[in-house]
């Protein structure tokens, strides 16, 4: 399935139906009076958050969504039917922005969330509404009120428990393929991963959702390389796994580059709990592992986990560590706000 995490769409709610001008016509009823019904309300524009989607690709092929117009009023005080609403189904984690792509309208983070983005126009009043003591036979009715319309941006931020970050070719996709059934493209060159991938890992009968984003390079927060957009996919994670290529000459410098981009990106990304993994240790000697782990520990101030996505060495240790942090975060999230410490 192709991946799309940002798109612009045009939405319009339905116009209201027109009111009716009608008079009661029955045998032996000379002055039946007005009986024109009101027009129906136009259809709404609804955003529905569903659990079985993880991309906005459907909106690449359809960018216009319009609610139906309400039915017109009729004689015998019959009201027009309400116009059918149009529903946009989006993945969990979708944000809705105004046309400027900066003003946030809604942030849909739970399956089943539903918002009415635009309400349909009201139906016009029929002539029965205008009858008065001084005007017993009004020939006036209102047209339906127009619906609302605008362009919006949909932006997807994947919902995952743990996020994989690192420079291109650090082995993130290999790690994901080893711990889950995800099958991202893997090759020995930078920028093999061109879009985020999700994988589900199981450890000690617990489920862990991991997000692998394309590798970052210096200047990524300003759009260099594949841009800063992908950093948004790990904003919602409980913990980050920072993978560093152990075969590189200076792993500490690689770590510094990625951390610098995360801090420059802003939000709360740089403050998230992080596990540092020295990857590709199957290609290193014990002395090299010890030397490079020490350098990483010095610059990161955190424990460094040697591992290899190819051989599987140290992978389960890292997954268990990620799982314990995620479980602790879930327990805090489940505590009612009034009782949270």
Image: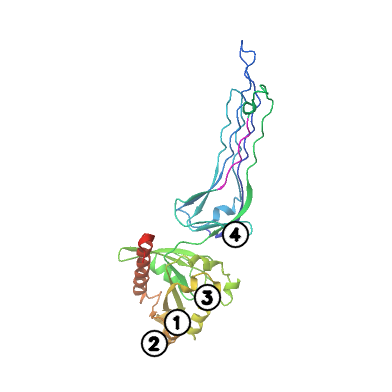
Residue mark closest to the camera, 3 vs 2: 3
Q: Position of residue 256 (x, y in %)?
A: 51, 81
Q: Nearer the viewer, residue 1 or 34?
A: 34
Q: Which residue is mark 4?
A: 103
Magenta segment's dominant SS is: loop
Secondary structure of residue under mark 1? helix
Q: Quadrant of residue 99?
A: bottom right
Residue mark closest to the camera, 4 vs 1: 4
Q: CA distance from mark 2 to mark 1?
A: 15 Å
User: Which numbered disc flags the more N-terminal residue, 2 or 4?
Assistant: 4
Secondary structure of residue under mark 2? helix
Q: Is residue 89 magenta?
A: no
Q: CA distance from mark 4 to mark 1?
A: 35 Å
User: Which numbered disc flags the more N-terminal residue, 4 or 1?
Assistant: 4
Q: Is 142 located above or below residue 279 in the figure? A: above
Q: Quadrant of the C terminus?
A: bottom left
Q: CA distance from mark 3 to mark 2?
A: 28 Å
Residue located 45% across and 63% down the image = 198
Q: CA distance from mark 4 to mark 3?
A: 23 Å
Query: What is the span of residues highlighted in magenta in the rendered image?
Result: 117-125
Q: Which residue is mark 3?
A: 263
Q: Position of residue 132 (x, y in %)?
A: 64, 25
Are there few (<14), some (14-19), or many (20+) residues within 10 Å of tag 1? some
């Amino acid at each position: 399935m192709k991946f799309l995490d940002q798109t612009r769409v045009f939405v319009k709610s339905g116009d209201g139906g027109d009111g009716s001008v009608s008079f009661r016509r029955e045998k032996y009823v000379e002055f039946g009076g007005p009986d024109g019904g009101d027009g129906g309300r136009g259809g709404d524009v609804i955003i529905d958050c569903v659990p079985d989607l993880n991309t906005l690709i459907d909106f690449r092929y359809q960018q216009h969504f319009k609610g139906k117009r309400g039915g017109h009023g009729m004689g015998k005080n019959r009201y027009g039917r309400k116009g059918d609403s149009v529903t946009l189904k989006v993945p969990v984690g979708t944000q809705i922005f105004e046309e400027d792509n900066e003003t946030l309208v809604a942030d849909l983070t739970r399956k089943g969330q539903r918002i009415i983005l635009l309400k349909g126009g009201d139906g016009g009043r029929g002539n029965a509404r205008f009858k008065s003591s001084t005007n017993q036979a009004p020939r006036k009715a209102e047209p339906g009120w127009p619906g609302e319309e605008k362009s919006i941006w949909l932006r997807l931020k994947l919902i995952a428990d743990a996020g994989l970050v690192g420079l291109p070719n650090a082995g993130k996709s290999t790690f994901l393929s080893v711990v889950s059934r995800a099958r991202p493209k893997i090759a020995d060159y930078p920028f093999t991963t061109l879009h985020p991938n999700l994988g589900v890992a199981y450890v000690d009968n617990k489920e862990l959702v991991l997000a692998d984003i394309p590798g970052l390079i210096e200047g990524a927060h300003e759009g260099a390389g594949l841009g800063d957009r992908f950093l948004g996919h790990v904003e919602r994670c409980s913990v980050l796994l920072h993978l560093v290529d152990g075969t590189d000459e200076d792993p500490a410098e690689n770590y510094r580059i990625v951390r610098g981009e995360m801090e420059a990106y802003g939000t709360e990304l740089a403050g998230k709990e992080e596990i540092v993994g020295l990857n590709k240790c199957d290609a290193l000697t014990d002395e090299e592992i010890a030397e490079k782990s020490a350098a990483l520990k010095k610059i990161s101030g955190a424990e460094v986990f040697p591992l290899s996505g190819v051989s599987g060495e140290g992978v389960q240790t890292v997954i268990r560590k990620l799982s314990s942090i995620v479980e602790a975060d879930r327990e805090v999230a489940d505590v009612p706000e009034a009782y949270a410490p």
